[in-house]
Amino acid sequence: MKRWNGWGDDAVELDLPAEAMQFLQQRLGAGVAPVDATLEQACAGIPASRLSPHRLVDTTLETRLRNSLGQSLPDWLKLRSGQVGTVTDGVAFPESGEQVRELLDYARDCGVAIIPLGGGTSVVGHLTVPEGQQPVLTVNLSRLCQLINLDREAQLATFGAGVLGPDLEAQLRAHGYTLGHFPQSFEYSTLGGWVVTRSSGQQSLRYGRIEQLFAGGTVETPRGTLQIATFPASAAGTDLREMVLGSEGRLGILTEATVRVSPLPQREEFHAVFFPTWEQAHDAVRALAQAKLPLSMLRLANPIETLTTLTMAGHVRLIGLLETYLGWRGCNEQKCLLMLVPADRAIPWPTPCVVHCALPGATRAWP
């Protein structure tokens, strides 16, 4: 089960390597371990729900707490301290567009505000329940997660908007396709969340940002159902997709999304390139982007990010050998790491790979 007060699955425990802990202490200073509140303590301060009973609405304290906050630092501090503040009055888990429609009608009739919830990975605070007299209902879309239709000819796939990234890719991969959209929150964020927040994946250079992948869908609004048909292009009228993209749930609740998919490539190669300075790295990335080479990813880290990446990776002996080699090649304290992936060989599920390149000013190595 997803952790109630932090990122990840509560069945997975991962201890930082001693070297990583030492690095953090050097950078941030000695810390004092907080005394975390228990789930029971956090729930104890939650007031009773203000919602009228409804067959689809769960008003238990734990469910309300687990669905009221995102993954920002302020949210984590609230949860870890047990001082969670205002939480939603109830949570619904609709299993169809019709049930979403029913919940919207219920909210309208009872004067209830609605907050749509996908994976709950938000760091911008839009899941925060506002203080006030109006009851709040959170609509959790996690049960709208099926592959509804796959059009092989048009390479379009329609999913329930609550499908998580790994589940989406697994369902497509079974048919030989990929969406290729991998934001940093990939494991716990949803397709609908990507659309309504204008998400950008780490391989968007090849597959496109979500606005290029989103082809249409279904939105349940307070005034009725909005069907956005898929079409390749039009020279007339307003593009309704643009109204949904980045809307953050203001227009209604996206229940189905149709996206453009691609056949699975046959192999992958992730390449890492080191540059002596930020200026050289910056110029190289600009040259690569302007050359419009067939790449799926260009990801550049500044010197601090590069140092953090290498230190937190563990493998002290191997990293030490790499650092020595890079020093011989002129890449020292100000070195920058560039990750790139050729588009014709890129597939999901990145894995460690050979590190090499022949760009001017770059260093190649084999860790």
Image (cartoon, rainbow, N blue to C red):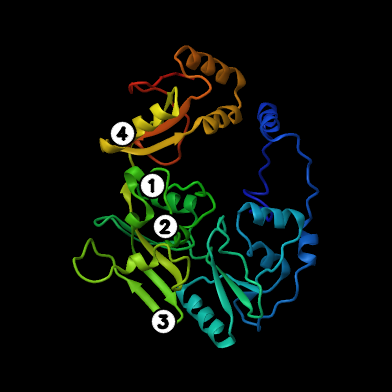
Q: Which residue is mark 2?
A: 198
Q: Earlier in the sequence, mark 3 or mark 4?
A: 3
Is 169 rendered above or below residue 21?
below
With 182 as the anchor, is 25 left or right in this view?
right
Instruction: Specify the amino acid type for callout 3.
Output: Gly
Camera sees residue 31: yes
Instruction: Specify the amino acid type for callout 2.
Output: Arg
Query: Label 1 vs label 4: CA separation?
Result: 21 Å
Query: Label 4 vs label 2: CA separation?
Result: 25 Å
Residue at (64%, 51%) from the top-left corner? Answer: 73
Contact, CB < 8 Å: mark 3 with mark 4?
no
Camera sees residue 354: no
Instruction: Specify the amino acid type for callout 4.
Output: Leu
Residue at (35%, 48%) from the top-left corner? Answer: 177
Task: Determine the residue located farthest toward the top in the rendered image.
Answer: 328
Q: Earlier in the sequence, mark 3 or mark 1?
A: 1
- Secondary structure type for disc 4: helix
Q: Earlier in the sequence, mark 4 or mark 2?
A: 2
Label annotation for residue 288: 4
Q: Which residue is mark 1?
A: 180
Please rate how many residues cluster around mark 1, counting C-alpha atoms within 10 Å: few if below 14, some from 14 to 19, many from 20: many
Q: Where the N terminus falls, by quadrant? A: bottom right
Instruction: Specify the amino acid type for callout 1.
Output: Gly
Residue at (61%, 53%) from the top-left corner? Answer: 72
Query: Label 2 vs label 3: CA separation?
Result: 24 Å
